Image: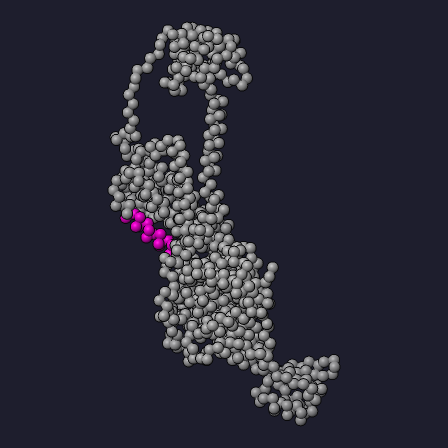
Amino acid sequence: MLSPSFTAKPYRAPMLTEPMPTMRDSNPIPLASRPLAIEARGLVKRFDKTLAVDGIDISVPEGAIYGILGPNGAGKTTTLRMLLGIIDPDEGVRRVFGHDRPHEIARLIGYLPEERGLYPSMKCDEAIAFLGALRGRPLAEGRARGRELLGKHGMGHAGDRQIRQLSKGMAQTVQLLGTLVHRPRLVVLDEPFSGLDAINQGKLELLIRDLAAEGATVIFSTHVIHHAERLCDEVAIIAGGRVPYAGSVDVARDRIPAQVRLETARADGRWRAALPGDARHDARDSGSHFWYFPLPESGTEALLRALIEGEAGVLSLSIERAGLHDAFVAIAGEAAARALEENKDEARR
Amino acid sequence: MRTGFGLESRQLTEALPSARLSALQAAWVIARRDFLAILFSRAFFFFLLGPLFPLAVGALAGSVGSKVERTVQTNVVAVAMAPGDNDRMVEAANAIGPRLADAIPNFSPVPEGDPRAILAEQGKGYAAVVTGTPASPQLTGPRGELDRWSGAVGLVAAQAAGSAEVAFAPVAIAVVQQSTAAARTDRIRTAQAGQLLLFLLTMLLAGMVLSNLVEEKANKIIEVLAAAIPMDAVFMGKLFAMLGVSFVGIAVWGAGAGLFALANGEVLASLPAPAVGWPAFIALGIAYFAMAYLLLGALFLSIGALATTVREVQTLSMPVTMLQLVVFFIAAYALTAPGSWFEIGALAFPLSGPFAMLARAALAEPLWPHALALAWQGLWVVVFTRAGAALFKRRVMKSGKAGARAGAKCFRFFHTKTQRG
């Protein structure tokens, strides 16, 4: 059976060196100047005695690709459900396109939940049409658009097939198309990449970019950071029910100092004083020595001068900028540790 | 800064006046899907055939029972006279029999012989044996059979001997359905029959709502629905879809029963006419069935919302089934205490109201209390549905295991109770 495809375009993995196409390419208005599609302030949600979400603030500009990142159980799904009005927050306010009650603008929203679900006995085009009907699109129109979308995404042959006859990946594609059938202005995807193979993950990335290029706001949650790094204009990192960071991917990465990777011929000398005290040393069998440490605030020029003057025998030196993954681990880890400490304090009291 | 709440976000719907479905439209989308899906499912076909099974079993049991009865108590009497006398006895029995129904036994002519030997013949099962002549018959058999048939045999023998011609005076017949003096007493039978039918139908059909919601949760589509439309509309749509399916079922069963009644004579004629008349009574029966079904369905939906597995559903639904029985007994008992506080309570309590009011339709003529009762019950349908939807939102739509914990806690409570009980 052919793999389901999210787009008829041939998939080509983007080169790491080429810039990711984002809304900034098609929308001349910078993100910071756009009106907000979603605003949330101080969202709190408790389930019995468990504090699932503890004062979350989120601002998603229109037309942005926005990532909600967090470890498992961080409160991502609860946050999305509150934003969509599936559950109400215990405290705080949220607005979607300026509306306090997201159901009032259901036609503008498309939502793919983490737990995918369709009626097994429904045919694919009917399932898409039904999802459209829930958002106000007439059934006949939805059926026609469903067939069009299926054809466009390489599943034209499956329109008359029942959902139960499809593979998991194909059923997931049908649900995703059902999420988009009514041409929503805001697309919310909860862990959209889970359950997809690498090829289809790439196709989904392209689809998300296409949606944003057409002007839709896309917000998705994930705990796999590289998707967010490749796609998102902005991210919110959720950990322990809070948002320790919300903003652009670049700023998040800049929170972690760049790492220096130095290779010297000698192990010791006057030049060692120029290295930070916590620099990690790794002696190789080849006789060379590797040193790893954060880029000093004084910069690379002073460091290089000290190394040369001290005759360290520099073989190589590279400066590696932190990735979103490192930033995420640092930010989320710190927040989770803080939350743990607070819980302990509370328990002691 | 962009974070000034509400200052820089714009209401996109200003240009889109219909940015959402109304509650009714949303309920209609759900109802239409559920109705068609259930109607064209194999399960519904078997569901329609459902009542045939108890009927078939009943018919089979009846047939076996009557056969057993025939075996135990026969009404065949052997006639062992001279051949000419045998013929005369059979002719006389045939002449008198139709006028006296079961009072005359079936005569089976056998060759003359020892009556004890004839009675002892295997596989014949004669109740008694008549020997001698029509003028001087002798009946041989067990004491009970002799007491039962001696008069009839004497009458037939007298007719066969031609000594006493049996003459029947003509009797004029006037049929009435009931005596006016006992009208209320008789109508109670109609009320009871109406209540029983209503109870059986709600019992049979309300469980369908429950299994439907559990299936929905198993399909995990409920979150898609909850994100797109208000949960009240989801619940309402499901309830009305199931009500529609129930009406289809009732229509099919009613048509079947009607055909059966046409083939076998009038059925309703055997019941006294209700106080409001048959057409109004049937219309009220349909309305009260709808109310009873919607109220119970809303209750079942709430239970379905709490449960996460079919096993949990079964455990949680048991107390509701018990409640259903209690409600039925309350309504049935209210019949015996007209005008009492107990009856008023049964009429006002939303779950027993439909049963009690249907009985009232059989007993009292005024129609306005029914309009009031239907409005009152309709109000409770809305309350139950909204409460169920709120419970669903609060208890089930939780991330991770919290939702499951809530359902499991409730499940454990009932499970422990039932285990102890």
Q: Is residue B85 magenta?
A: no
Q: Nearer the viewer, residue A39 or A202?
A: A202
Is residue A335 among the parts visible in the rendering?
A: no
Locate the N terminus of chain A by quadrant.
bottom right
Provide residue B303's location: percent of width, then percent of height.
44, 52
Is residue B169 among the parts visible in the rendering?
A: yes
User: What segment carries the magenta color?
Assistant: B372-386
Taken as a whole, is the magenta stretch helix, strand or loop?
A: helix
On screen, residue B113 above or below A206: above
User: For residue A58, which quarter of the picture?
Assistant: bottom left
Residue that sits furthest to the right in the current view: A286
Residue located at (60% from left, 76% from top): A15
The answer to whether residue B196 is left or right of residue A288 is: left
Q: Is residue B379 magenta?
A: yes
Q: Nearer the viewer, residue B305 or B54?
A: B54
Provide residue B326's location: percent of width, then percent of height.
39, 43
Q: How many marks?
A: 0
On screen, residue B64 above or below A288: above
Residue that sits furthest to the bottom in the current view: A309
Residue located at (43% from left, 17% from top): B105
Residue located at (55% from left, 63% from top): A154
Provide residue A101's location: percent of width, then percent of height.
38, 66
Residue located at (41% from left, 58% from top): B231
